[in-house]
Image (tube, rainbow, N blue to C red):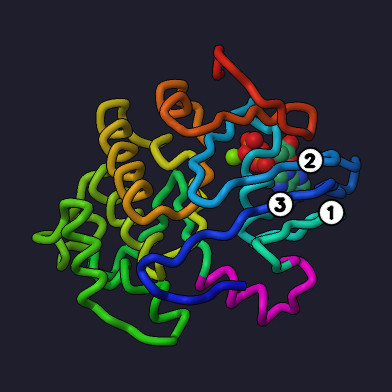
Amino acid sequence: MNSSKSPSQSSPRIEVSNLNKVYFTPNERLEVLKGLNLSVDPGEMIAVIGQSGSGKSTLLHILGTLDRPTSGSVHFGECDLFKLNAKGLAYFRRSSVGFLFQFHNLLPEFSALENVMMPQRILGTYVDDQIGMELLTWVGLGKRYSHRPGELSGGEQQRVAIARALINRPQLVLADEPTGNLDSQTGSRVFDLFQKIQREKKHTSILVTHNAKIASRCDRVLRLENGTIQTTNKPYV
Ligand code: ADP
Ligand code: MG
């Protein structure tokens, strides 16, 4: 795994092979992902669409190693992720992946800057508030660094969450409906920023969205259906 922290670090190719995920509930065996294959080029920005319950979040959680597949593999460059032990997985997750969720999950009692810095504190290798300030400035909130989430608008909170997702210079950014909770104009501005940063940092992004306009602006759109991925042209949703 390339955990180099130089600004020009390149993202490795991601290869997902024959991924299966089964949930067992008291009443049923739910096959959510069924032999899913996917190759992601370094620096690609991919939109994942599909009906509610089609397994989009499940796929994102597995790619970010927040959850394990029932079978199948995910290679991140040379690294076969689910062969790592718990410590290796935690390090991968903290150092190489940035997460962005629909609900920003900012900690209410901490300032914007403290929230942005949280993943760096958890990783524990070094903490540099200056990088957090730069990211906050980049997302247009340099003057709001001391505000708590409750003192920011929804769009501003999501921009803080973008800065937080990027603080450890991840090679992969996973975003689960990051604009789903915002009005369309604010959502579109947040996506503009997300895409601008992606173009500059050149990390790989995989983004779940219900927004056809946003999906159409990604490099590739994948539709999740019947547990596998169908490459899709229009209509996107
Ligand atoms: P999406 O994000 O596309 O809406 P999800 O990946 O969240 O879909 O869920 C896919 C299916 O798996 C849904 O039917 C959901 O109810 C089910 N599911 C998700 N997580 C669990 C779980 N932990 N246990 C049982 N079923 C689950
Ligand atoms: Mg979901």
Image quarter in which the N terminus is found: bottom right
Question: Which quadrant would residue 227 be assigned to in this image?
Answer: top right
Q: Counting other residues with Cα less than 10 Å from the Cα at mark 2, is it few (<14), some (14-19), or many (20 or more)?
A: many
Q: Is residue 150 visible?
A: yes
Residue at the extreme top = 235
Quick one: label 1 or label 3, which is nearer the N terminus? 3
**Marks 2, 3: nearer the viewer:** 3
Residue linked to disc 1: 72
Image quarter in which the C terminus is found: top right
Query: Residue 214, image x and y in percent?
Result: 41, 28
Q: CA distance from mark 2 to mark 3?
A: 11 Å
Residue linked to disc 3: 15
Q: 213 or 176: nearer the eye?
A: 213
Query: Residue 168, image x and y in percent?
Result: 41, 70
Above or below, comparing residue 112 to residue 177 in the picture: below
Q: Does any atom of ligand 1 lie closer than 8 Å to the CB of label 2?
A: no
Instruction: Decide whether the magenta segment is chiefly helix, strand or loop.
Output: helix
Label of residue 36 in the image: 2
Q: Is residue 112 left or right of residue 57?
A: left
Secondary structure of the residue carrying tag 2 is: strand
Q: Residue at x 62, y 30 (%)?
A: 222
Disc tally is: 3
The magenta-colored residue range is 80-95
- Please state which amino acid type lies under the numbered disc 3: Glu
Question: Which quadrant would residue 182 be assigned to in this image?
Answer: top left
Residue at the extreme bottom = 125
- Please state which amino acid type lies under the numbered disc 2: Leu
